Image: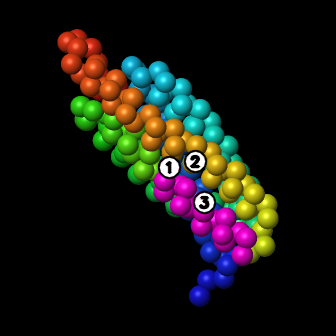
Amino acid sequence: MATVHENLLDWLRDAHAMEQQAENMLESLSDRIENYPQLKVRIDQHLQETRWQKAQIESCINRLGSSPSAFKDMAAKVVAFGQGLSGVVMSDEVIKGAMSSYVFENMEIASYRIIIATAEMAGDAETKRIAQEILMQEQAMADWLLNFLPEITTQFLSRSETPDVAAKR
């Protein structure tokens, strides 16, 4: 049976891989967005937050005497690559990208809530503080996406009805 400390390290490694996946997904989405400047700006902002988050999680793992999982990080990159390719064939890529991002943010929120509770039980105030800060960023992004979905849908539909206007991206 794993100890609280072992579980914390394992879940931090999962979070590191998750942030690796998020970074790759956000980069891919940002590179493909052509006609939705408000979405692109927010994706690019969250991409910078994600890079900071990944570094913070890695610092927690290192402080606890371990290192990120190369296997989990590589698996996350492969999954993100597949997700990026799937968007290319969708006629409503921007809508699917926004929806997928919202779902992914909620998975991150759940993961950080688990890390916070585990860090508290382990007596690791620094990891708890970092996870709480990351949680606030993830929650802000999820909220923004949820509130922006109607607007991007309207933009997409308007662009779709105009001849010779690209709506997909």
Instruction: Answer with left or right where residue 89 lies relative to residue 22.
Output: left
Instruction: Answer with left or right where residue 155 lies relative to residue 138.
Output: left
Range of residues picked out in magenta:
105-121
Instruction: Answer with left or right where residue 1 lies relative to residue 52.
Output: left
* Secondary structure, magenta segment, majority class: helix
Q: Amino acid at mark 3?
A: Tyr
Q: Residue at x 75, y 57 (%)?
A: 129
Q: Residue at x 51, y 45 (%)?
A: 142
The disc, 1 or 2, on the residue closer to the chain's N-terminal end is: 1
Mark 2 touches mark 3? (CB < 8 Å): yes
The disc, 2 or 3, on the residue closer to the chain's N-terminal end is: 3
Q: Closest to the observer: 135 or 89?
A: 135
* Residue marked by disc 1: 105
Q: How packed is label 1: few (under 14 Cα within 10 Å), some, or many (20 or more)? A: many
Q: Residue furthest top?
A: 164
* Residue marked by disc 3: 112
* Residue marked by disc 2: 138
Dividing the image into 4 quarters, which one contains the C terminus? top left
Disc 3, SS: helix
Disc 1, SS: helix
Q: Is residue 138 above or below residue 32?
A: below
| 120 within the magenta span | yes
Instruction: Answer with left or right where residue 151 lies relative to residue 108.
Output: left
